[in-house]
Image (spheres, grey):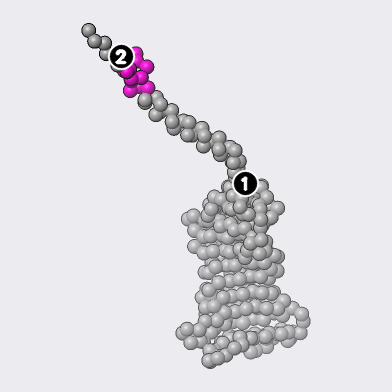
Amino acid sequence: MVDDGTGCGTFKLASVTITNPGQNFTATPVLSLRGGSPTVAADVSGIALATAPNVSGGLTKKGAGTLTLSAASTYTGPTVINQGTLALGSGGSINASSMISIASNAAFDVSALATYALAQTLAAEGPGTATVLGGVMGNVTVDGKTVDLQDGVNIGTLALSGSLAVTGSTLRFDIGPDGTCDRIDVSDYVFPGGGINTIDLAPLSNLTSLAAGDYTLMTAGSGFDETFVLAQSTLTVGGTTYGLSLSSLPWTEVVTVTPLAVPEPAALWLAATALAATASWPRRRSQRSSAAPGSTGAIASPGPIQAA
């Protein structure tokens, strides 16, 4: 650990290596970085996990400050940003991490990179807004990965500062009551990446019905130039089935929810009766056509036999 020379009591860590704690270790190793103000700024070159082959670990960011990873980190477990900001420096990466989870009101800052390519599932769950900070000239690219906002409980928003390019990926949203749903807000542009991009919808676990109408899934400040398809054409909530249709408008991606009509029992009975009558008509017609021309179709009985 060295003083960064600013005279503000801040330090820079060249690297952090977390080793295998051994057998029967019950507590998670914790590295606490504290400064002289409520907002803590820390710069760590990289985080490496030196563990046994069958042990993997991750990184959980807590506290209101910013933690910057300025070199490649090799840990393979999840990256969880519970509070504050986790930033990647110009040489930083967490590509080996199994997933990235951003809590409400926390941020993942990749603005130091010209382009950040998502290498794992990105999850943003909770009732608030999770943020990915991209640069003014930078993009976030999602190629064959999943951006998951579904938690079955809360409606939340993932805000991306910068632009987004999506290629052959899946975006997962919760849908809630009264026209509410999870949403992705992109401040700049949604670029075409190619491939089929799928939107997957799921109702909140406590829903008993859906409101008919439009639900805004995505917004883009500079517009869309990408195509999405729905993973499902209907949703069933509380015993009612709803039809789904997707519309790409200049600055929004909208799904329209429409309840599908269910025939009344009387209407079903009338339809069944009409179908049965229609089915019997060809049989009656066939019986009439088998009789001799000019006859009534009846078989005449012989008259009495008279003796001479």
Check disc 1 and report the residue beneath it.
Answer: 259
Q: Are marks 2 and 1 in contact (CB under 8 Å)?
A: no
Q: Amino acid at mark 2?
A: Gly
Q: Secondary structure at mark 1?
A: strand
The residue at the far top in this view is: 308
Residue 294 included in the magenta stretch of the image: yes
C-alpha span from label 2 to label 1: 70 Å
Tell me, yes or no, if residue 119 can be seen here.
Answer: yes
> Which stretch did the figure color magenta?
288-301
The quadrant where residue 157 appears: bottom right
101 above or below 167? below
306 above or below 31? above
Residue 80 spot, x, y in % from top left: 61, 75
Which disc is residue 303 wearing?
2
Q: Amino acid at mark 1?
A: Pro
Residue 183 spot, x, y in % from top left: 65, 58
Tell me, yes or no, if residue 136 can be seen here.
Answer: no
| Crowding at mark 1 (Cα within 10 Å: few <14, some 14-19, many 20+) | some
Residue 24 spot, x, y in % from top left: 55, 91
The residue at the far left in this view is: 308
Quadrant of image for the N terminus = bottom right
The quadrant where residue 10 appears: bottom right
